[in-house]
Image: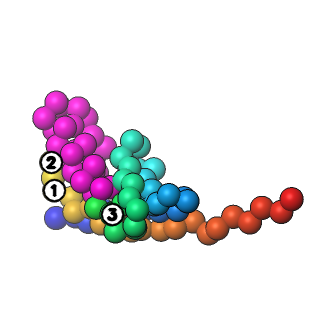
């Protein structure tokens, strides 16, 4: 089984944390804590891939047939400083 590392971007807001990946648009997670956001993100990932398989929607070749282990590498962009 192959392993594919996928960057998952963590962004903080005043009300919690969001996670998304550019590799699979539309898959996101949100939570009050980073752990909650990771859990929701991974659940969304599994649900989307299951829906793709059930409805015969093409998925990126790296995700086909379940023969790839996806390893999410969580990254957080550096904080941006605004000077007025």
Q: Name the residue under label 1.
A: 67
- Any part of residue 59 in sight: yes
Residue 53 on the magenta span: yes
Judge the density around disc 1: few (<14), some (14-19), many (≥20) Cα neighbours within 10 Å.
Answer: few
Q: Which residue sits furthest right?
A: 84
24 relative to 34, above or below: above
Q: How far apart are marks 1 and 3 (CA)?
A: 27 Å
Residue 1 location (% of width, % of height): 16, 64
Tag 2–tag 1 contact (CB < 8 Å): yes
Judge the density around disc 2: few (<14), some (14-19), many (≥20) Cα neighbours within 10 Å.
Answer: few
Quick one: 46 or 84, which is closer to the camera? 84
Q: Name the residue under label 3.
A: 36
Mark 2, secondary structure of its residue: helix
When asked about the image quadrant of residue 42, the answer is: bottom left
On residue 65, the disc is: 2
Q: What stretch is highlighted in magenta?
A: 40-64
- Which color scheme does this rendered protein use? rainbow
Mark 1 or mark 3, whichever is nearer to me: 3
């Amino acid at each position: 089984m192959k392993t594919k590392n996928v960057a998952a971007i963590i962004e903080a807001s005043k009300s919690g944390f969001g996670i998304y990946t550019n590799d699979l648009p539309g898959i996101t997670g949100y939570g009050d804590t980073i752990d909650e956001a990771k859990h929701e993100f991974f659940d969304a990932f599994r649900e989307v891939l299951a829906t793709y398989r059930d409805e015969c929607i093409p998925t990126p070749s790296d995700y086909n047939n379940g023969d790839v282990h996806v390893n999410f590498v969580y990254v957080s962009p550096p904080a941006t400083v605004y000077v007025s």
